[in-house]
Image: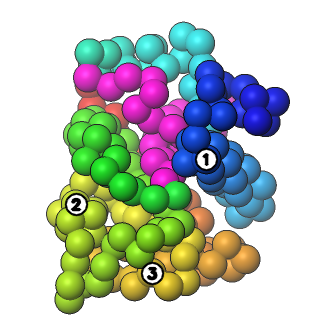
Amino acid sequence: LHGVFPEQEDPAQSYRRASGDAFEYFVLQYINSNSTLIERGVRAVRLAGSDFPKLMKKLELSNKVRQKDVDIFLQGIGEDGRPSIFGAVFPKVSYAERIRADEVTSRALMEKGLWSITVTLDARGELGTEQVPTVKRQTINMGGFHACYSLNSDTVSGGRIYVVDVKQKGMSNPFVRDIVRAWNRFSSGQMQIVS
């Protein structure tokens, strides 16, 4: 497993961690191979080296957000040709207890003007329904994230939760559509990093 997930110090520690890494990799590749996003200069990145501390310093979050707290960032290329980070993605096979920790980081990034979302397989049906919401659904719907995208057709959509068919092409795919809209808002100055 170490060959597939080199950034994971001990990928054999459990199938949960390995499955989480695999899902993060899938989300990263899905975004980066999507023709609608490619056409608009949008891609998913993992910040390495000094890039993460530089962004956190710019956001004035150096002492609040750790590199291991954010899995994937969204980056767009502006008209001037320069890349800009405009969003964060928190992929989760299953939320278990982790959504609360991610919520803290998500809210900190949103307060600074980044678009923050979670993507899930909702493997255990943890989101409930709008009529009988779980704590996880309430966390999302009460603004812990801008939105949640479930790749599980059994998930009940509603509120800030959208069900996504990864085979759905173009702007009819809510995940792709909303990434494009967030980039358009950011690149037009309607959504700005606050520092």
For residue 58, above or below residue 145: above
Q: Amino acid at mark 2?
A: Thr
Whether 152 is among the magenta residues is: no
Q: Is residue 188 visible?
A: no
Q: Which residue is mark 2?
A: 139
Residue 70 occupies quadrant: top left
Looking at the rendered image, the quarter that the C terminus falls into is top left
Q: Earlier in the sequence, mark 1 or mark 2?
A: 1
Q: Which residues are magenta?
A: 64-92
For residue 90, above or below residue 67: below
- Secondary structure, mark 1, is helix
Q: Residue furthest top?
A: 50
The front one of 157 and 86 is: 157
- Secondary structure, mark 3, is loop
Q: From the image, state whether disc 1 or disc 2 is nearer to you.
A: 1
Q: Which residue is mark 3?
A: 155
Along the horizontal axis of the image, is 68 left or right of 26? Answer: left
Looking at the rendered image, the quarter that the N terminus falls into is top right
- Say the numbered circle drawn on residue 15: 1
For residue 189, above or below residue 180: above
CA distance separating discs 1 and 2: 26 Å
Query: Badge 1: how crowded within 10 Å, few (<14), some, or many (20+)?
Result: few
Where is residue 9? Give x, y as percent.
62, 22
CA distance separating discs 1 and 3: 23 Å
Q: From the image, state whether disc 1 or disc 3 is nearer to you.
A: 1
Q: Amino acid at mark 3?
A: Thr
The front one of 82 and 151 is: 151
Residue at x 49% of width, y 62% of height: 120
Residue at x 31% of width, y 79% of height: 128
For residue 70, above or below residue 38: above
Q: Is residue 179 visible?
A: yes
